[in-house]
Image (cartoon, rainbow, N blue to C red):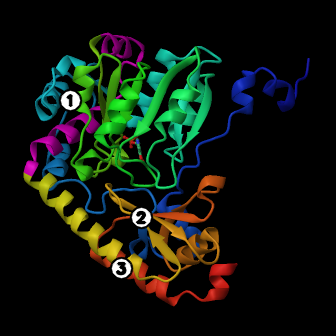
Amino acid sequence: MTSTAADLANWIRPHLRRAGSYAAVPSLAAISAATGIPVEQIAKLDANENPYGPSPQVLAALARYRDYHRYPDPTHDDLRRELGAYLGVEWQRIVLGAGADELIDLLCRLFLEPGDEVIDLVPTFGMYRFSTEVAGGRVVEVVRQADFHLDLTAVAAALTPRTRLIWVAAPNNPTGTPLTPAEAEGLAALGIPLVIDEAYAEFSGQSAVPLALRFEHVMVLRTFSKWAGLAGLRVGYGVFPPVVAEHLLKIKPPYNVNVAAAVAARAALADRAYREQTVGRILAERERLAHLLARVPFLEPLPSAANFIFCWVRQGSARALRDALRQRGVLVRYYATPLLENAVRISVGRPEDTDRLLAALHALTPEELAA
Ligand SMILES: Cc1ncc(COP(=O)(O)O)c(C=O)c1O
């Protein structure tokens, strides 16, 4: 019997055949190959990475470690204890993932039956939609207000008996909007499992961890990708109610966080001076960048509580702006979605990255912007 690729596609679960993919940013090597610009001359401001990289103590710990031939501790108790001390929570509430992304996926698997609904406070981070759909769930979008703060009345009105989860990024990606304590309380008061994604908490200086300790249905996600400069190693974690932590540990792949990630995360956590210094540099550069962007005639930057700045593009097209900057070796994030059609997100880099970006912005011609 013969079969064709089209036949085989029919065996794939229908909801996954229909699902969209997550638009991840291309690698530096791919951009370099496409533009002919050497990697070291590219200002990579498109993925909210930490431009300073990990602490030297992280690199030393990775070089010192010898047991790469052994499987990791499946529950990573040492790192969880240290994270418990870092956040002031019982360490048993903490579960690690291969990035916060993996925890988003695991939470969808834990809470969603096919057809169950999640509330997505758009525009926001795309992984909530992605993982919900992979799990067979249905995304119910609630559009934020014009200033990107939440419309709590609309959230309440969107709840149905099938609502299983509410996702909220605090601060929000890509808009940089903080979650106010009143908004967090308002969401928690709805009584639906609420995941507050604090990937950028070290930059905002605000946290909903105390709220998670008060309410059994409130969870908080964190990551080492941003403040610790470990995006490439994939290590995130969350603070969960004990019953959720227990079930996440049960369903996660046993060795989801690899030993290099755990070694690096422990060393990063121990190097408090580097954390304070790096976060301080990024915050100082955010202020400088915000000030400079506000003087670019065709941009309208919004205030940000994270390590990136969202900008409305007031003349020309945001896509053309992204493309023209890329040709000059500056990468920024553009979203081909209706709510963000005329906007870009610019990560805070080093002062020299800001200089390169500003030089490119000021060199752009009206023709390039209109393209
Ligand atoms: C709001 C938010 N959550 C989670 C993540 C992903 O974090 P991780 O690298 O730990 O998977 C990001 C990354 O951009 C993010 O913006």
- Say which residue appears at 48% left-offset and 82% top-offset: 361
Q: Is mark 1 within 8 Å of ligand 1?
A: no
In percent of width and height, residue 349 lies at 33, 67
**Residue density around tag 2, few if under 14, some if 14–19, many if 20 or more, within 10 Å:** some
From this view, report whether residue 41 is shown above or below residue 11.
below
Under mark 1, the amino acid is Pro
The reply, left or right, for residue 110 in relation to residue 270 is right
The boundaries of the magenta stretch are 243-272
Where on the image, by quarter, is ligand 1? Answer: top left
Q: CA distance from mark 2 to mark 3?
A: 12 Å
Under mark 2, the amino acid is Leu
- Say which residue appears at 50% left-offset and 75% top-offset: 299
In percent of width and height, residue 231 lies at 35, 48
Residue that label 2 marks = 302
Under mark 3, the amino acid is Leu
Residue that label 1 marks = 210
Q: Secondary structure at mark 3?
A: helix
- Say which residue appears at 54% left-offset and 35% top-offset: 154
